[in-house]
Image: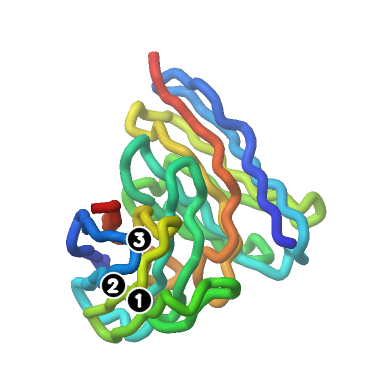
Amino acid sequence: EIGLTQSPATLSLSPGDRATLSCRASQSVEKYLAWYQQKPGQAPRLLISDASNRATGIPARFSGSGSGTDFTLTISSLEPEDFAVYYCLERHSWPLSSFGPGTRLEIK
Amino acid sequence: EVHLAESGGGLVQPGGSLRLSCTASGFTFGDYAMHWVRQAPGKGLEWISMISNDGHSTYYAGSLKGRFTISRDNKRNSLYLESSTLRIEDTAIYFCAQVVRGYASHWGQGTLVTVSP
């Protein structure tokens, strides 16, 4: 079973800052990694699939990179609505999936 | 527009059972695999199960296999999750999600299951 770790657990930044979130897999997942955003009381929203493909309607300030075991979600300039929890998910184990523990992005 | 609506949550005693439903609209339901994902209060997301578009193949997280059963009725545009011998640690919001190119793409708003004496 592939394990995912995310760092940092909490990231404190200000609007306008650049955010860099990390997801690491215990073994290679090739490109098969997604990022989700979840706000309190809401369902998760798909941001990025296959490591770097932005989902429909996702602003260009969100970008994903990486392959193998190390992946990054970058938010180039934080907007107030970007403060949320972010999860990575691997589907290399298809049809099984697993989520990372999440990174909480909070306002500094 | 894709819309998914979960229902069937509520309060259940430990050892009890429950059947959750997810009603889909806005897309051809029978063309897509579907996931169930859950989230315990204040915790992260946990993938539970996936069913193929035709319902012939089902998959479960290893820790949950045997206690949960996923199924679907494509004529009714509905997805189901049945659980037996519920435990307190099964308390969570249960989400259904449409699988697009291997990923949970569109999600419902979830239904809360509380397992408590």
Is residue A46 visible in this depiction of the protein?
yes
Q: Nearer the viewer, residue B75 or A47?
A: A47
Q: Mark 2 lies on which chain?
A: A
Residue type at the position of mark 1: Ser
Circle nearer the N terminus (3, 2): 2
> Same chain for marks 3 and 2?
yes
Residue B73 makes an appearance in the image:
no
Classify mark 2: helix, strand or loop: loop
How far from the left and from the top, in percent, is residue A31?
36, 84
On the image, numbered disc 2 is attached to which residue? A18
Q: Which residue corresponds to the image point at 23% horizontal and 80% vertical from the top-left?
A: A69
Q: How is the protein colored in the picture?
A: rainbow
Q: In this view, which residue lies farthest toward the right?
A: B75
Q: How crowded is mark 2: few (under 14 residues within 10 Å), some or many (20 or more)?
A: few
**Which of marks 3 and 1 precedes in the sequence?**
1
| Label 3 – label 2 distance at C-alpha | 18 Å
Name the residue: 41% across, 57% down.
A80
In contact (CB < 8 Å): disc 2 and disc 1: yes
Tell which subunit mark 3 falls on: A
Q: In which quarter of the image is the N terminus of chain A?
A: bottom left
Per the image, the residue denoted by label 3 is A87
Q: How far, Cα to Cα, is label 1 from label 3?
A: 18 Å
Mark 1: which secondary structure?
A: loop
Callout 2, which amino acid? Answer: Arg
The residue lying at 43 percent from left, 43 percent from top is A40
Q: Quadrant of residue B5?
A: top right
**Mark 1 vs mark 3: in front:** 1
Question: Which residue in the structure is indicated by mark 1?
Answer: A76
Q: How far is disc 2 from disc 1 in space, using C-alphas?
A: 5 Å
Q: What residue type is labelled 3?
A: Tyr
